[in-house]
Amino acid sequence: MKVADTSYVVGGLLRDQTIFESEDFLVPELALYEIVNVIWKHEMLIRDIRRGLDYIEALDELIDAGVITVITYGDKISRAAYGISLRRKIAVYDSIFIALALETSLDLVTLDKEQRKAFEGEIKVKR
C-alpha cells in the first residue's frame, strides 16, 4: 500500500488505469473532493474528457473494491502538514499527503515533482 496524492489518482483514472491493478492506495478524505474537482475541470474547462461522472463512478468502484482506502485524518496530521508546508513552502493541501505518508510509514506516489522533493526532504528530517 502507498499514499497516493490527487495527481496520481487522477492520472490513473484519466490516463493509465493499469496503476490500480497491482497496488492499493491510501488517500486522505480531502483527495476525494480534489479528484472530483479536477475531473470537473477536465470536462468543463480543458474539455479533454466527456462524461466526468463516468470517472467519478470508476473512483467509487475503486473505493468499494478496496483498491483505494479513504481515511479521515485528525489533529496530528493537520499539525504535521502545517509544519511541512512552512518548512517546504508548499500548500497545506499538498502537505497533508506528505504528513499522512510519514505518519503511516508508507511511500508517497505523486506526479508532482515539487511535492515528491518535499516528501524526500521530510524523510531526511525524520531520520
Image (tube, helix red, strand yellow):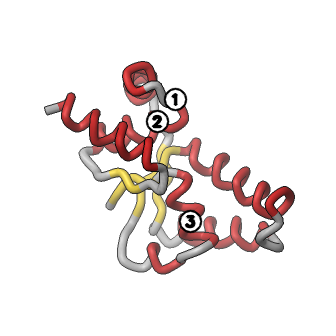
Is the residue marked by circle 3 packed among few (<14), some (14-19), or many (20+) residues within 10 Å? some
Q: Where is residue 114 in the image (x, y as percent from the top left)?
A: 44, 42
Identify the residue under disc 1: 92
Three-letter code, disc 1: Val
- Residue at 83% of width from left, 66% of height from top? 47
Q: Camera-side residue: 29 or 118?
A: 118
Q: Which of marks 3 and 2 is in front?
A: 3
Q: Can you say whether 27 is above or below 18 in the image?
A: above
Q: Can you say whether 85 is above or below 109 in the image?
A: above
Query: As drawn, is 85 to the left or to the right of 60?
Result: left
Between the C-alphas of marks 3 and 2, the distance is: 19 Å
Identify the residue under disc 2: 96
Check whether the beta carbons of the residues at disc 1 and disc 2 lie within 8 A of each other.
Answer: yes
Which image quarter holds the C terminus? Answer: top left
Q: Camera-side residue: 84 or 88?
A: 88
- Residue at 57% of width from left, 48% of height from top? 31
Disc 3 or 1, which lies upstream in sequence?
3
Q: Which circle marks residue 11 in the picture? A: 3
Q: Position of residue 58 (x, y in %)?
A: 64, 72
Three-letter code, disc 3: Gly
- Residue at 19% of width from left, 31% of height from top? 126
- Residue at 24% of width from left, 45% of height from top? 105
